[in-house]
Structures are given as C-alpha cells and as structure tokens.
Amino acid sequence: MKEHRHLKNVATLAYDPDKCSGCGMCVEVCPHAVFFVEDKKAQIRDRDVCMECGACAKNCPSAAISVRPGVGCAWAILLSEIKGRGAPSCD
Amino acid sequence: MMDPRSDRDKSPELGSVPVIRTELSRQDFLGAVKARFGIGRMSYKVSPGLYGAGRPGPSSPVLVSANYKLSFDSLRRELGNLDAWILVLDTKGINVWCAAGKGTFGTEELVRRIEETRLNRVVSHRGLIVPQLGAPGVAAHEVTKHTHFKVVYGPVRAADIKKFLDAGMKATPEMRRVRFTLKDRFVLTALELTNPFKYLVLITAVLWVLSLLGLHLLSWKGLYPYLGAILIGGFIVPVLLPWIPGRAFAWKGWLLGIIWAAFVNISQGLLPLTAASWERPAAHFFLLPAISAFLAMGFTGSSTYTSLSGVLKEMRYAMPVILGSASVGIVFLAITLFRGL
C-alpha cells in the first residue's frame, strides 16, 4: 500500500550519529520506520514521514535523538489557541 | 467502571489475581459500539492491576495494557488459549497511544504498577511486553533501571500478538508499522460525523421553528448543498484521502468542496451568474469549500501520520483562507435569505 504523506520539511526530528550506540531501539519503536540500523549506527530513512510521536527520543538510551513531541490534530491546536494555555492535547 | 472480574465466579482464580475470559460477550460488543459513537466513552474503563488469562504460571509472558476497556478487550480477545498475565495501567480510560502521548501510559505508572502488584514475585522471568504504541510514554531503559524488568516492545496491533510470541518475541517490520487503511478511515469518519450532524439537527430544528413562524428559510434546495459539504469534509475526503491530489488535508477538502459548489450551481441552474441572482451561487462558492476544508482539516487528529509541526504549518495557511472565505460566504447567504423574505 502507498505510504501516506503529509507536509515536507516540517518535522523537528534531530539526530546526532556521534552519540548513537546502534542499539536499534529507535527502529523498534518508530511506527513509520523512519530509522534503520546500518554499520552499527542508526540512519534516517525518510524524515518526512516522522509524525513527532517522540517514541524514539524517549527510548534512546544515549540521548542521540531529539524531537518536539505533540499531537498532529487541528482540533486540539484550535482548542489550545482558544483556551490560550498549554500544549495541544487530546483532552 | 467496568470490572472484568465479574467473570471471577465462572473461572478458577490464581491466588488473588482475577482470571479473565479471552472471548468477548454480547455485552462487550454492545459496549464497544456505544463507546465508538461517543456514548459514555470517557467512563469505559477497567480497574488497573494484574489479570490472568488462561492458567498463567511463573514463566508466562506479561502483557501491558491500558485501562480503556476497548484497548483491554482488543488484547484479551486475541489471546485465545494462551496463558499470560495482563498488567493494566491506569490511563484514565484512554487508549494506549493517546495515553502514551500524554504520559499517563508512561514510565512512572508502569514502575508503580510493577511494584504494587509485586510482579517480581508473580513471575520468575524479568520480561515485559509493552505495546509499541506505548513507547512515546515509556522509556524502556528507565523501567529496567528502576525495576530490573526488561521492556520488549510488542506489535502495533493486538491481532499480531500470537505471531509475535510464536516468533520468540520478534516483530516483523510489518508488525511495527502503523497503517491507515480504507477500513480504518471508514470507521473513524463515523465518529467525525457524529458532531457536525448534531449541530445540523439543531440548525434544522431552529429553521423548522422559524418556518412555523412564517420565515421560510428551510428548503431542501437551500439545505442540501451544505449537507453535501459536511459529507465531503467529514466523510468523502477521509475515505478517499490518499487519492485526492495534494498533501494538506484542508486543501483536499477545499478542492472537493469547490467542485461540489460548481456542481450544485450548475444543477440548480445558477450558472452563468446573472446580475439579478448572483448572491446564492456566490455564497455556495465561498461557503461550501470553506466548510469541507475545515472539516477535512479536523481529520488530521484521526489520522495516524500527521505531526504537530505539519498541522501547525497547514493551519497557518488554511485558517485565514477558510475564515475569510466563510465570512464572505455568510454575507452572501444572508443577502440571499433576506431577499427570499
């Protein structure tokens, strides 16, 4: 099946290969197969399919990955704008 | 709060751990339908704690789940005759993925439940199977540091759990991927449409009362273009999502909305525009795409692939266009309605 794609060049995903130990946790937790491991280092396959769930950063034992996690939900963003406080969430 | 422990009298107990069934009852099914349509969804919970499926022993696997009853049910019905432990976290009745995003399905809660249930005395091994979609809230290495239990992430879908266990707790790349199939989108749109239709019923009721009072604003010809725009944004766009050109949801909604507006205007004989009656077709051209764009944009929250950054960017462009277009459209619609009086 065709891979769904939203906007290009927006993901806040940042990865520092120097810190990577090659454990592969990022590959295990990513729901969109953004990472793969090659030569004992994680590599980014396609950063444009990152949905910023934050699982990789949370589970990276060597803190080589960072991302601003959040919900990609227009209603949540609108509500948080209207309420004027807090990050968008599903509440 | 639902308590699957009511099955207790029909199943043998293992010490103080309640044993649950692995097939769903008619009541479970009806409850699922209600929750899907938002009836009592926020209180569709099970009690957090440790449960047994089949006849689990010290070497049986431990599966972690959320206390949203639909999450818990979708796991237990996949277990069949498998012997396993289920550790239910208190996620306030929210599903695994959403709760992980909030952090209620998280390291802290998992560590607390492991200690509270004295899991280290219940099982002899030190493995935990956490659903992969729980990973945004759980730091596997932190859990190990605090409890000596090692987290293995299970498949995304509970339906793959047996295959995962049979393969020696190995997930195929396919099991790790979130999908968003035609069927998924079809089910989700039912939920998305519940809300706009509630308002529509309300508006229709108001218009009907007004028509009783002599203000004839309610006509099928006047109403169906808007019904169609709601249906397009809330249902057609989500279902046809990957096949509509473009990437932004609002754009996809706008595109089908403008085509719908053109179709409506042609079929109502409103094109080409005439000086005498240009307001109605103009209202259609400005309002209908705005409605379907707005509703389509709302589907970002149901999708499984949009990021916060992506939706923020989309909204930065789409919201001014939608609001501007809708405002102009409402003015034209108002003129049409006043002319009709």
Image: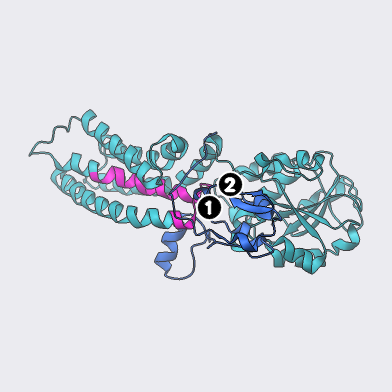
Chain colours: A blue, B cyan
Measuring from the top left, give residue B179's x and y in whole percent. Answer: 58, 41
Residue sitting farthest toward the left: B275
Question: Can residue B105 be seen by looking at this rendering?
Answer: no
Q: Quadrant of the C terminus of chain B?
A: top left
Give, as a three-letter code, the residue at label 1: Met
Query: Left or right: A53 with respect to A80?
Result: right
Residue B300, magenta (yes or no): yes
The residue segment tinted magenta is B286-310
Q: Is residue B78 left or right of residue B339?
A: right
Q: Would you name the residue on which mark 2 appears?
A: A32
Dominant secondary structure of the magenta stretch? helix
Secondary element under disc 2, as helix, strand or loop, is loop
Placement of A47 over or under B27, stated as above or below: below
Amino acid type indicated by mark 2? His
Examine the structure image and report whether residue B126 is included in the region drawn in magenta: no
Residue shown at 29%/35% (left/top)? B259
* Residue at the farthest bottom position: A85
Mark 1 Cα shell of 10 Å, populated few (<14), some (14-19), many (≥20) = many
Would residue B216 be found to the left or right of residue B226 on screen? Answer: left
Q: Which residue is mark 1?
A: A51
Residue B258, given in percent of the width and then of the height, sits at: 28, 39
Q: Residue at x 34, y 40 (%)?
A: B229
| Residue B21 lies in quadrant | top right
Is label 1 in contact with label 2 (beta carbons under 8 Å)?
A: yes
- Quadrant of residue B175 in the image? top right
Residue A64 placed where, x, y %?
Answer: 62, 63
Which x, y percent locates residue A34? 58, 49
What residue appears at the point 88 percent right and 56 percent down from the top-left corner? B125
